[in-house]
Each structure stands twice: as structure tokens, then as C-alpha cells.
Image: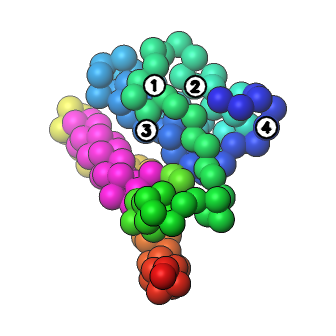
Amino acid sequence: MPEPHLRAADADRAAVAAQLGEHLSAGRLTVVEYDERLAAAYTARTYGELAELTADLPATSAAAPVAAAPAATASRSGSHTAHLHGGWSGGPSRAAAWRNWAYVAVVVLGVWLTTCLATGELLYPWPIWVIGPWGAVLLAQTLTRRGEDDEQRRQLP
């Protein structure tokens, strides 16, 4: 990762979130630890804060730092097309972002449902505060980025 005092981008936070998801599915993190670290990842401001979240975990396939290259330097042959079809400004693809959201939604709903069944009563539906805003942001990004991608495709030779 770049110098710890430099500010991190959304793509960097998403990359760390993906790493945390891999560690959760590998059994290195509990659901509670994952939730805490995921919340910290999305509120992190610097690379140093992000690095602390995975310092005690082994490297994963997604451990490479995100280095978003400006679109102007991308070659027209492969990387420009990958940028148009792959994702948002060097971040995870739309499909990956939605998969991450769905995975977290299933996990938090499962925790809530298990708690409800264990206590025998219907508890406050707190998962809505985890999956609702995140889903709304993803939906807004998906809808607003669609028009930008169409415009960029029209400009290709």
C-alpha cells in the first residue's frame, strides 16, 4: 500500500472489504469481527487505517493494492474496454459489488433470524441499517454510471 498518511479512495476501501470477505469465508474472522472491520474499512480515511484492518491476516488474492490509473493513460485496446465493462474507476465490477452486498445481506439477515429464533421473539430488524443504505448507494451508482458508460462507448473509434 502507499504511504500510510495518504488518503484512501473508495476503490481502496472496497478492496479491503473484499479481502475481509475472503477471510470471513476462510474462517479466519468471526461474523462479529468481520462486521466491525467492515464498518471500519468503509469509514477509514487513510491507507494506514486500512492496513491496520488486515495486519493480522495472511495475504489473499485480493491483497494487491488498488492503483487506479487515470482513464487518459489507459490503452484503447484492452484496459479501456475493461474499464468500461469491468467496473467503476478501477474498483470492483458492478457484479462484484452487488455480490458483496448480497453476501453481507445474507450473513446479517442470518444472524438476525437466528437471534430471533433463539429468543423466540421478533427483534428489531437492525439488518435494514446495514443492507439498506449500502444497497441504495449501489443502486444509485449503477443507475448513474450506466449513462456515463454508454456515452464513453459511443466515443470509442
Amino acid marked by disc 1: Glu
Q: Earlier in the sequence, mark 1 or mark 4?
A: 4
Q: Which residues are magenta?
A: 92-115
Q: Nearer the viewer, mark 3 or mark 1?
A: 3
Tell me the CA gap for discs 3 and 4.
21 Å
Measuring from the top left, give residue 67's x and y in whole percent: 61, 43
Residue 123 vertical position relative to residue 3 in the rendered view, above or below: below
Tell me the CA gap for discs 4 and 2.
16 Å
Relative horizontal placement of residue 1, taking residue 61 as reference (left or right): right
> Is residue 98 visible to the viewer in this orientation of the structure?
no
Residue 90 vertical position relative to residue 63 in the rendered view, above or below: below
Which dot marks residue 53? 2
Q: Nearer the viewer, mark 2 or mark 3?
A: 3
Q: Main secondary structure of the magenta part?
A: helix
**In this figure, which residue is indicated by the disc labeled 4?**
6
Which dot marks residue 18? 3
Measuring from the top left, give residue 26's x and y in whole percent: 29, 22
Measuring from the top left, give residue 153's x and y in whole percent: 45, 80
